[in-house]
Image (cartoon, rainbow, N blue to C red):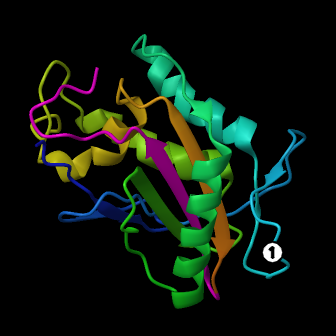
């Protein structure tokens, strides 16, 4: 059995990041801006916490990192998006950041409400590329420990084929949750 690692990181408005040990989520300060691209409402709920996710933008933000490495692009999963949306609403209602207990890979992001675009939210995870060590097996894939680039390695994990994301507002923060199937970040395996 392979051990899967999870991580939480918080990116504050000033751009600093703090890695917290042993949970797979990515947090940053985020906000939505209007986009000419089509959006998909992941939740049919009338709750004010639900926000629309621009799946084309989210996919493009993920797949640009995969394309740089010659890894096949991710496809959108409505079932993962539904699961991610439910969890994003939970996080927003509690105003806390933690991973779900699901069987999927998961990146979590939180940031100041209305401050970041959805692309910036994903790019916060992608910016961890600077710590990535190519041709090494997880968890030895990052300079300074796997917590430095675990979100990035989940994004580029070759065996992962689909992603779905949900977005919700808390009292002061926006919460983005992306779930991945199959999950990545398995001990002893290379990302690609």
- In the image, 103 versus 187, the foreground residue is 103
**Quick check: is 48 in the magenta stretch?**
no
Residue placed at 59% from the left, 47% from the top?
Answer: 164
Q: Is residue 161 above or below residue 152?
A: above
- In the image, 41 versus 126, the foreground residue is 41
Q: Quadrant of the N terminus?
A: top left
Residue under label 1: 45
Q: Is residue 8 above or below residue 135?
A: below
Q: Residue 176, how many percent across, how many down?
A: 57, 61
Q: Is residue 126 above or below residue 112?
A: above
The residue lying furthest to the front in this view is: 1
Residue placed at 85% from the left, 46% from the top?
Answer: 35
Residue 20, visible in the rendered structure: yes
Position of residue 152 in the picture relative to residue 145 (left or right): right
| Residue span colored magenta | 171-192
As helix, strand or loop, the secondary structure at mark 1 comes to loop
Q: Quadrant of residue 60?
A: top right
**Quick check: is 188 in the magenta stretch?**
yes
Residue placed at 37% from the left, 68% from the top?
Answer: 99
Position of residue 149 in the picture relative to residue 42 (left or right): left
Q: Is residue 159 above or below residue 155?
A: above
Q: Quadrant of residue 137?
A: top left
């Amino acid at each position: 059995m392979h051990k899967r690692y999870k991580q939480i990181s918080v990116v504050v408005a000033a751009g600093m990041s703090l890695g917290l040990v042993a949970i797979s989520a990515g947090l940053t300060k985020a906000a939505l801006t209007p986009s000419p691209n089509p959006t998909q409402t992941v939740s049919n709920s009338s709750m004010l916490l639900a926000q629309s996710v621009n799946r084309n933008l989210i996919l493009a933000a993920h797949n640009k990192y995969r394309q740089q490495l010659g890894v096949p692009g991710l496809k959108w999963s409505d079932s993962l998006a539904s699961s991610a949306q439910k969890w994003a609403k939970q996080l927003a209602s509690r105003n806390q950041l933690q991973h779900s207990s699901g069987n999927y890979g998961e990146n979590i992001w939180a940031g100041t409400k209305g401050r970041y675009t959805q692309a910036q939210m994903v790019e916060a995870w992608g910016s961890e590329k600077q710590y990535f060590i190519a041709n090494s097996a997880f968890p030895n894939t990052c300079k300074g420990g796997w917590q430095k680039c675990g979100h990035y390695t989940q994004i580029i994990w070759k065996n992962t084929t689909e992603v779905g994301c949900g977005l919700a507002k808390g009292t002061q923060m926006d919460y983005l949750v992306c779930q991945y199937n199959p999950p990545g970040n398995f001990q002893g395996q290379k990302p690609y």
